[in-house]
Image (spheres, coloured by chain):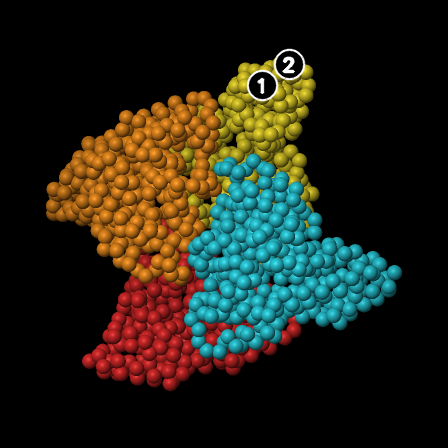
Chain colours: A orange, B yellow, C red, D cyan
Amino acid sequence: MNFASDNTAGAHPAIVAALAAASDGRAMPYGNDPWTERVAARLAALFEREVAVFPVATGTAANALALAALTPPWGAVLCHEAAHIQVDECGAPELLTGGAKLVPLAGDHGKIAAGALDAALARGVFGVVHSVQPSVLSLTQATESGTVYTPDEVRALAGRARAKGLAVHMDGARFANAVAALGVAPAAITWRAGVDVLSLGATKDGAFAAEAIVFFDRARADGFAYRRKRAGHLFSKMRFLSAQLDAWLADDLWLANARHANAMARRLAEGLGRLPGVHLQHPVEANAVFAALPGAVIARLAAAGFRFYRWPDDTADAVRLVTAWDTRADDVDALVAAAREGIDQSS
Amino acid sequence: MNFASDNTAGAHPAIVAALAAASDGRAMPYGNDPWTERVAARLAALFEREVAVFPVATGTAANALALAALTPPWGAVLCHEAAHIQVDECGAPELLTGGAKLVPLAGDHGKIAAGALDAALARGVFGVVHSVQPSVLSLTQATESGTVYTPDEVRALAGRARAKGLAVHMDGARFANAVAALGVAPAAITWRAGVDVLSLGATKDGAFAAEAIVFFDRARADGFAYRRKRAGHLFSKMRFLSAQLDAWLADDLWLANARHANAMARRLAEGLGRLPGVHLQHPVEANAVFAALPGAVIARLAAAGFRFYRWPDDTADAVRLVTAWDTRADDVDALVAAAREGIDQSS
Amino acid sequence: MNFASDNTAGAHPAIVAALAAASDGRAMPYGNDPWTERVAARLAALFEREVAVFPVATGTAANALALAALTPPWGAVLCHEAAHIQVDECGAPELLTGGAKLVPLAGDHGKIAAGALDAALARGVFGVVHSVQPSVLSLTQATESGTVYTPDEVRALAGRARAKGLAVHMDGARFANAVAALGVAPAAITWRAGVDVLSLGATKDGAFAAEAIVFFDRARADGFAYRRKRAGHLFSKMRFLSAQLDAWLADDLWLANARHANAMARRLAEGLGRLPGVHLQHPVEANAVFAALPGAVIARLAAAGFRFYRWPDDTADAVRLVTAWDTRADDVDALVAAAREGIDQSS
Amino acid sequence: MNFASDNTAGAHPAIVAALAAASDGRAMPYGNDPWTERVAARLAALFEREVAVFPVATGTAANALALAALTPPWGAVLCHEAAHIQVDECGAPELLTGGAKLVPLAGDHGKIAAGALDAALARGVFGVVHSVQPSVLSLTQATESGTVYTPDEVRALAGRARAKGLAVHMDGARFANAVAALGVAPAAITWRAGVDVLSLGATKDGAFAAEAIVFFDRARADGFAYRRKRAGHLFSKMRFLSAQLDAWLADDLWLANARHANAMARRLAEGLGRLPGVHLQHPVEANAVFAALPGAVIARLAAAGFRFYRWPDDTADAVRLVTAWDTRADDVDALVAAAREGIDQSS
């Protein structure tokens, strides 16, 4: 009954099995192995084009290294003010880019408002030596608020950025959830919409610890192997990262996991949404539900053993509930029932 | 028949099983889990004192982050000229320390010569603003040449360094092999001998990808959690790192694996050492054999399917042969036999 | 007739003379010279306490190096959203701190609003490994809007910051103007009000290029000499920096220069303020006037040879007019007259 | 009677006068001034080609910024083991390049031995992800040992480096002395011999504090303005740097100063060289004399008020004597006489 985060889930049995199988025998290190090759081929097929792929183990590494490939140290990275790179990575982008600056932009429901981006791009800082130079737009898909950008929205924002010479990064820690929510081809919300580099996350969607940095423009990956290595993110036994990704991509496990998580979030949202005194704060499009509800009810849920975070912080009368590939409908229903009971008793 | 590196081995079945078991169900992220707690307790017991422990996934991360905790950005890290941090980490220490300088020292068989350290410490650079300030001595145990420092040797070098105010780091990517070779308590070649921080490697000794940064002086770990995070090395599903370390430490698996690898290296050394035209270049104390032998024989071994690196580079008439927890005596014997046959035919 | 910036002024004759005098003969380098010693003594007297002093040549260097001494690389520096460190230093603080993050705060007239600081300090990020750690409050005195913080205001903001463990930095590129405006002892708006380190600027107030980083708590200066050197900011012929500061501090030249500049700004503000259609955007307390006026009048002033910047950017119907130690009353009056004439003709 | 360093000299009267003149009146900041324009034109004429020029105030800044323009953070800079960048800049190159590694090479008399460079370039590290990538060869002209590379020597070393894809940097803190010694066109030992970027030093040759980073290939200067700014090395009152360089370049003052300094060194070398018990350690080609002589004599010279450094450190029975633009023949002769007297008395 853990709704604290999708990173509290274990790994999917198919991934566990793949890892065990990959462990049998010897393989050459640092990515010179069949699993890593296979992952590259699978991602090329999935994205319908040649890509350069670099597996790493954490989302923070994927994001910060990807940004480092796109911005000079004197660059600025435009992102949503609630973006993971801005608030949850303890300055990793600053470290790995050599000191680039993140510029937070506003926007409802975790999505950058076009107007906020326009304003940022209209500032007269381009070519001015005193100012960091806007170099990257980073979009989070699905967002930190559990919403998704449509292909048109990605294209519109990315287009604005590219028109001013910026590269476009997508933080896809929950990319699978976004694809599942939108029902589109992965290409439609990435390179076809103007994205240059994707941080593709498997960890939250059923892996142990596996992310892939995917370059759609392979030229941008020049020197990236050194960048990854010198940040300590090149695995010697790379097959263990790649085997996770391989199993995750096989038979559309990635999509099935994400669909399940999304469905559980919808079920939760529908259940809670019907309760008096509960207010859903964001559209529930991916695998997270943000709900305002009475403090007494929150306390009751916690006492009943449900785990979650008050959001945006400990003092809020609101919670974030995240579902994952292994969330059970029974647990969802139990939470809704407990909330209902709490509300009934409070009133 | 892969002798290229101990990192070409898979994970030990007990570690595979532990990982699978750890995957069952939910656990809180970022190290707030029972596995991580257990690892800390096991290491405290193993080292006979309180320690601060930070699991990471690669040896390069462990080393570079540990050094970053010990040196200011204007510091110098004294190490052997063949140390992994100096030649095999693509500048990771420079990146993560914020630009500290590595100072390579000479010494036979991969071990820093006391005289070389003395000379470095005698240079009149302390307190001179134009010079980087010697801040850390880094010892590799077991060394890159397959040798080990005795407790007295560690104490002597560490003592010299500490007398001048330097901290002492140990790159223990093959620490288990060193303990197995020396038959001493882990404490005897670490904190009791003057080591402040250890990069303790499990990856080469039977894990998938797991290292622990061990601080013997917990005060030195102040702020280290941020350092790890901002380098992208804090795992959300930390239990998967910790479960590996937990199983590796349980029932002395770490030691059994290392003893086996060392025994295989000795068997290989004894076999090869008896052949005419073969010269062992370093004492074989841990799990690597460095042997000069005729180029024609090397070519023959490669053609026969044995994998290894010519050493120090592709043009050398010498090879590095590394054994691991899973090296089979039969394969060792086969290699020796093939070498003997090659020598017989060449002569 | 240049009102573009106080950095378009030359050096004061007394400073020119001092530099010429200092050039006569030999002196030991790197600060081991009588001028540098004298500057330290003068600043100790001026601030009524022992200080550690480090001359550098640019305000950006002074600020970024000072911040680097106060924050770990994973720290956050709270500052006004218009602060020089945030918008005009091209990421120098990020570079020299090793990647710390600047957190912009709102506030009218260039001064951080207490409420904005409270909100920033109330965020539940302290001790949370995912977040950069608030480490420094940076105040600009005088501000980028030509206003000044009173001693009480400094104390109130610094007190809030210190209560949460933050250090306090003051960007005093125009510190002299602030002292002149407030008529207080320098100590009253620095260490007595909770400031730990001051970037004290002479460049804009009559020097060629000279700033002093002043540590009120000398313990914080530990290692700072290395920090300055490795950023390339240690002058070999240091006497030439110090001779400027020495002359600037002698006979209260610093204060006289600032008083004159402030007086010229007041004269300008009074003149413009009386004109119909002119709106002064900020209180004029130091040496800058921010005035909204008709675009046609702005164009006329430019055509008449007055130099200034439209502010905040080229499209604004508003200007920034900065006065300096050498601004002549005649030029001020000429500008006011030209503006009056323009307004008359426009209406 | 100061022979400690050429940086103990003051500024040449012509430069003092130029600075005073430049201070009269207003000028636009950050290099948009006639002095800076003129310096660029003078250097284009001097080097017989278009160049991109960036004035800075210290040699360490010039070197470290120039290197940062030539190497990625994962690069290696090959230099002489006694190079200023390696031993006297407290890690500035490491900081400003984002962590590149310096690789010290041996060679007599401060000059990189061709064999040492060949060996470094022959190492199988190119394209190997574990190794920093050799990216720059840095030559010091004149060297730290007071010698100079001939045009052929520069061409030979630079050619080797360029053949392997490295860029070539020249640390010309004493470039004027080298040109004066060789009697060649500046182009002959820079771009015509394969040098890409020159750190051109005026400080030691008669300026207060002024160096110019000169890019012979302007494309390499892309983004360099941001690099300089974010390191705090863009002067607001740039005219004061440029006015120094302008006067230094006018009427061949740079060359006259250097010729004088070199002549004084030769006079010193000839005088000392004739004394029994004195051994000149390096050819005296520029403005420094390295001489071994009895400790008692050294002590005597110091007692007589001559200032110099024992070299390479305080314990050596050898000294470094540096001459400058203002060294007087009388002082040289006095030192020789005092040494002779000392030797006579010792024997």
Residue drawn at x 33%, y 81% is C335
Q: Residues within 10 Å of mark 2 (few under 14, many from 20)?
A: few
SS at badge 1: helix
Visible in this render: residue B55? Answer: no
- Residue D257, percent from left and from top: 65, 67
- Residue B4, percent from left and from top: 53, 26
Q: Is residue A9 above or below residue C212?
A: above
The foreground one among A14 and D72 is: D72
The foreground one among D295 and D44 is: D44
Instruction: Kindly identify which residue carries mark 2.
Output: B345
Image mark count: 2
Are the residues flagged by discs 1 and 2 in contact, CB closer than 8 Å?
A: yes
SS at badge 2: helix
Left or right? Give the position of B251 relative to D84. Answer: left
In three-dimensional space, the C-alpha distance between marks 1 and 2, rounded to whole angstroms, equals: 10 Å
Residue drawn at x 27%, y 37% is A187
Q: Residues within 10 Å of mark 1 (few under 14, many from 20)?
A: some
- Residue C257, percent from left and from top: 45, 80
Q: Chain of mark 1?
A: B
Q: Which numbered disc, 1 or 2, marks the residue that appears first in the sequence?
A: 1
The foreground one among D336 and A144 is: D336
Residue drawn at x 22%, y 42% is A151
Which part of the image, by quadrant, shows the N terminus of chain C?
A: bottom left
What kind of residue is marked 1?
Arg
- Residue A50, percent from left and from top: 34, 34
| The quadrant where residue D198 appears | bottom right
Instruction: Kindly identify which residue carries mark 1.
Output: B300
